[in-house]
Amino acid sequence: MVTRRSVLGGALAATGAGLLTGGALMPLLSARTAQAAGAGSDGSGGAAAVAVPAPFTVRMPTLPVLSPISTLGGQDLYYVTIKEVAREILPGVQTKVLTYDGHFPGPVLRARSGRKVVVRHRNTLGMPIAVHLHGGSVSPENDGSPMDTVAPGTSRTYTYPNQQPHAPLWFHDHAHHMESEHVYRGLSGSYLLTDDVESALPLPSGQYEVPIALRDARFDAAGQLVYVMDDVFGRTTILANGRPTPYFPVAARKYRFRLLNSSNMRFFQLRLSDGGPLVQIGTDGGLLERPFTTDTVGLSPAERADVVIDFSRYPVGTKIVLENTLGPGTPDQVGQVLRFDVVRTAADPSRVPDVLRTLPPLPAATVERNIVLSMDEDGRQEPRGLMDGQVWDPDRIDQTVTHGTSEIWTVTNANKIVPHNFHMHLVQFRVLERGGAPVGPAEAGLKDTVRLFPGETVKLHATFASYRGTYVYHCHLLDHSAMGMMANFRVR
């Protein structure tokens, strides 16, 4: 299981392929990279990797949608079993994975604002778990905090009141020191919360609204997932909805893609191979106020993006690749994510309105705080992940917030070569500035996770008007939070 081992090599790699050849960095990376490069399925062997299929030879599946066992009493009730199963990721190979109800990647749970969801999770694994609804506004006992775990062989019921606007939330394991491996091995799923504002819009829907979970992976000679904590150099198989570099048939019309970066460490920079336009309509906290047209979409681990692609501009028979322009890994390894194959025509009554929603004005902030993320960069065997210079202590309250107030948090990545990002439980925030300048349209909506490349600073506005209690904020490069880059805030 996860221990406080080095993640420095993986962190460095996440900033992009250019770092792989940076001479000044190589002394820091050499020992840990060599260990990762020779790791077998248990992190100790040297077995050669199983052959990954050629790109675009397997079809990308759509994610299964969970069905409630009851809808009585104004709430939706789900029973979910957390279990290890074998599933086909590589063609013809059964790979052991950790799952919610046997689904890899995790399923979609669809919810509606104002309607309660109750989920009973039964843990059949041999280790504790904690289920965190990422981006959800929930009470402390339902947050799935790192030390509030579900023991092997027991069950836990989580209640989600959904008293928040629409948003593409997701759920994943958060058991401290184990979350990194658990999520890597499969414990994540999508939680798509909608409301009247969103559902009234004429956006693509039904079969033309497609959630896509992106991540990277590495396989041993038997086709099993290799887990080494700092092994982003070896995780060069890109999975879209659990299949390696797949193809996806589409009609010549508009599609809405709900993108989630469920990787532990990898950053994505996505574009269409012909440089064609992408219309971004949403981010972590739901729809933007206005759509904007771009040619690239960036996602750090845990970030989401809602994108519309209009395939009507392509004739039937066209094949368009969704590319990734960030390393680590060579373009032939990680540069192709999936291919859209335009196979038919279809009627298209959908459209993207000029105005998607109206966000309320920001309340005046009464407190300003400075938060610093850092990690040892001196090449030591056991580097520490730090929040404001301290390793996480579950019993220490690092920030005390007055209920009902708004605050401005200035968050800085103090490292020179290690990237991070920042996720706060309980609240969706607004990103006011990046590097002292107003943010671009991709960060102009509600967010719960924000990237921080080396030396970057972001200024966030958050309102703490829902629940009282203790929550965490942390780097969502999960190896970093597992290494201590996490802190507690208490709303009282």
Image: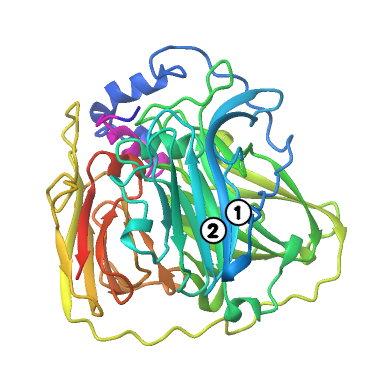
In this picture, residue 339 sits left or right of residue 8: right
For the residues bearing labels 1 and 2, Cβ distance under 8 angstroms: yes
Write the start and end of the magenta stretch as one range: 3-19
CA–CA distance between discs 1 and 2?
A: 6 Å
Query: From the viewer's perspective, is residue 27 above or below residue 429?
Result: above
- Mark 2 or mark 1, which is nearer the start of the sequence? 1
Mark number displayed over residue 108 = 1
Q: Locate residue 280, reporting x and y percent.
A: 56, 68
In this picture, residue 257 sits left or right of residue 188: right
User: Of all residues shown, which one is farthest toward the front?
Assistant: 73
Task: Say if the magenta span includes residue 13.
Answer: yes
Residue type (three-letter) at the residue carrying disc 2: Tyr
Indicate how the structure is coloured in the image.
rainbow
Mark number displayed over residue 191 = 2
In this picture, residue 234 sits left or right of residue 389: right
As rendered, which of 424 and 376 lies closer to the eye? 424
